[in-house]
Image (cartoon, helix red, strand yellow):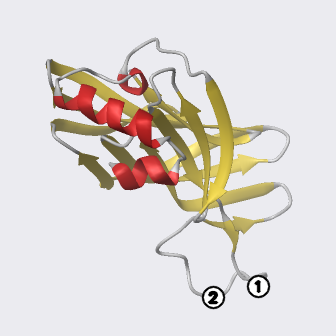
């Protein structure tokens, strides 16, 4: 957890307080439904475009999507198997094998998806891979994993998270529109 805190500039005194409260069974604000961040910033790191939300207790939630890379201009060449790539024309662009990810230092959830942008008109998620889901849960248990379509522009990954003092349904998802792809999380 400390490396996550260090990566997102959480002061050591806040780190200590957060770890103490976590060990005593308290839930951080970044993991609490309805909590509002006191600071929100956008970062581009390691091929991810992320929104970093910092809460009053010092906890952090990071939600991001992979920054696409252009495929060979001829349309010929190796397909990206590890990242998000783009192909298409000036009117229709396909973003393939994109990673959507959220992380708050305790719970991390992610999956891959492909979406299509009809420039100036609409966007839709054309496919998603439930088998690509990945998660981490420090000091907790995750079960009942599901990756499912909510609409043509929204796909969600949900799981039951066993974290003192009980269980709750946690989720993350991705939405697409003509302005891009963005992730969200809950509660």
Residue 116 at what x, y percent from top left? 65, 51
Front-most of residues 137 and 78: 137
* Neighbourhood count class around disc 2 (C-alpha, 10 Å): few under 14, some 14–19, many 20 upward: few
Residue 85 at what x, y percent from top left? 62, 68
Q: Which residue of the protein is positioned furthest toward the front in this rendering?
A: 13
Between marks 2 and 1, how big is the CA–CA gap? Answer: 8 Å
Q: Is residue 36 above or below residue 163?
A: above
Residue, disc 1: 74
Q: Are marks 2 and 1 in contact (CB under 8 Å)?
A: yes
Residue 13 at what x, y percent from top left? 42, 36
Q: Is residue 49 left or right of residue 23?
A: right
Q: Is residue 129 visible?
A: no
Front-most of residues 26 and 50: 26
Q: Quadrant of residue 89?
A: bottom right
Q: Which residue of the protein is positioned furthest toward the top in this rendering?
A: 34
Q: Residue at x 45, y 30 (%)?
A: 185
Q: Residue at x 26, y 49 (%)?
A: 136
Question: From the image, which quarter does the C terminus lie in?
Answer: top left
Q: Is residue 89 left or right of residue 23?
A: right
Q: How many marks?
A: 2
Front-most of residues 91 and 32: 32
Q: Could you say whether the residue bearing mark 2 is in a helix, strand or loop?
A: loop
Residue 28 at what x, y percent from top left? 35, 24
Q: Is residue 150 left or right of residue 66?
A: left
Q: Could you say whether the residue bearing mark 1 is in a helix, strand or loop?
A: loop
Q: Residue at x 56, y 32 (%)?
A: 53
* Neighbourhood count class around disc 1 (C-alpha, 10 Å): few under 14, some 14–19, many 20 upward: few
Q: Residue at x 66, y 59 (%)?
A: 94
Q: Is residue 113 left or right of residue 131?
A: right
Residue, disc 2: 77
């Amino acid at each position: 957890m400390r490396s996550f805190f260090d990566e997102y500039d959480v002061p050591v005194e806040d780190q200590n307080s957060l770890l103490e409260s976590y060990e005593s069974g308290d839930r951080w604000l970044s993991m609490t439904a309805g909590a509002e961040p006191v600071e929100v910033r956008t970062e581009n790191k390691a091929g991810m475009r992320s929104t970093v939300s910092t809460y009053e207790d010092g906890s952090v939630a990071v939600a991001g999507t992979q920054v696409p890379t252009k495929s060979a201009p001829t349309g010929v060449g190796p397909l990206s198997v590890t990242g998000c790539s783009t192909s298409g024309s000036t009117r229709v662009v396909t973003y393939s094998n994109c990673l959507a990810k959220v992380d708050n230092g305790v719970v991390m959830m992610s999956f891959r998806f492909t979406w299509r942008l009809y420039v100036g008109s609409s966007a839709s998620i054309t496919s998603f891979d439930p088998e690509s889901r990945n998660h981490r849960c420090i000091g907790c248990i995750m079960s009942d994993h599901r990756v499912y379509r909510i609409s043509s522009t929204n796909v969600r990954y949900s799981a039951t998270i066993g974290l003192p003092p009980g269980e709750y349904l946690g989720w993350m998802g991705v939405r697409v529109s003509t302005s891009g792809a963005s992730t969200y999380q809950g509660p």
